Image (cartoon, grey):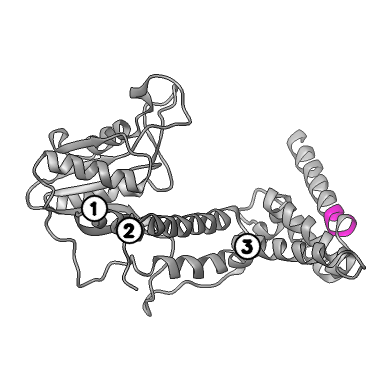
Amino acid sequence: MTALFIRVLLGMLFLGLMYWVLWKLLPRKLFTFVGAFVVLALIGLSFYNPAQVVSVPDPIWKLFIFPFQPLGIALILSGVSLFQILPSGTNKTIKNLMLISFGLLLLCSMPISTEYLVNFYEQGSYPKPDDPIPQAPVIVLMGHGTTETTLPFKDAIQLTETGDRLLYTVILYRQQNQKPKVIISAGERDYLQGEQKNRLEANDISNILEDLGVDEGNIRLESVSRDIRSSAVKVKELLDKEGLGEQQIILVTSAIKMRRSRLAFEKIGLNVTPAPTDFHGLPDNEALKRRLSVDDFLPTVEALSLSSNIIEDSFGFIYYFVRGWISISL
């Protein structure tokens, strides 16, 4: 009985909060009575007879929870402010700046627009079915940011969202007829304090690769670099020391960073076969296409983060070109 009372109380609180957001905080012109009634009814039904395995559809739930997320709150409040300012006689410059900032934030956080952006940016990285990865004596893994440090209460090393680079490296390692050298390029975690050995990301990556079947004797660590350029330089020094500087290498990194990485490695004289992973988009394929849904038009932090990563790499690409660290054919 107590549990039922708590569920009813929470349900009423939820509905009351939603009512306040729809009818008190936002201008009534933005919502019709019918639309608000439908949303409130769906939310109310989701709390009815919770013993049944019936819930609000995922798009409806995301639409409901959106105004309570930080990104949703920021967009809604910005939109309300813009809605109030545009008809007024406020300074034209302020209007334009608010309109640009709101439009940019909205566009960069919508999955549908981010998908077009990432497809355009990754299109040169999609592997061709007729171009399999060749046999090579060296695999270079760009491991920066693929792992998190081991927590005191956990035995396992944590992988980040780019951690599939490690798994792909192991797959490529097993595909080679003769076991290649695997160079792990990953520097210190600068955001941590403590003993250096505990801050070296390359050590953690090496432990994971060994657990997945890569021979310890075939692993080489490059733990000094901080970025793509310094990785290329240090890897070249390591390869020259082992007499492999002229050999073909397989370069593994995220698809977004692959073009800049490949050009940076080639600039210093390495023979590179790109092996991108961590794709976010879908190649142009008639047999497999993305289906549009309501989710694609609801701004998300993930989409905003992905847009930011693409913009950051674009500026990095321009910077590398200006510094002469990469060459492109015009």
Q: Residues within 10 Å of mark 1 (few under 14, many from 20)?
A: some
> Is residue 45 visible in this depiction of the protein?
no
Q: Residues within 10 Å of mark 2 (few under 14, many from 20)?
A: many
Residue under the image location 32 percent in, 43 percent down: 230
Q: Are marks 2 and 1 in contact (CB under 8 Å)?
A: no
Magenta segment: 19-24
Q: Residue under circle 2?
A: 326
Determine the CA span between mark 2 and mark 3.
44 Å
Against 174, residue 286 (above or below) is below
272 on left or right of 86: left
Q: Residue under circle 3?
A: 59
Residue under the image location 13 percent in, 34 percent down: 217
Q: Measuring from the top left, give residue 307's x and y in whole percent.
A: 53, 59
Please name the predominant secondary structure of the magenta segment in the image.
helix
The amino acid marked with disc number 2 is: Ile
The amino acid marked with disc number 3 is: Pro
Q: Are marks 2 and 3 in contact (CB under 8 Å)?
A: no
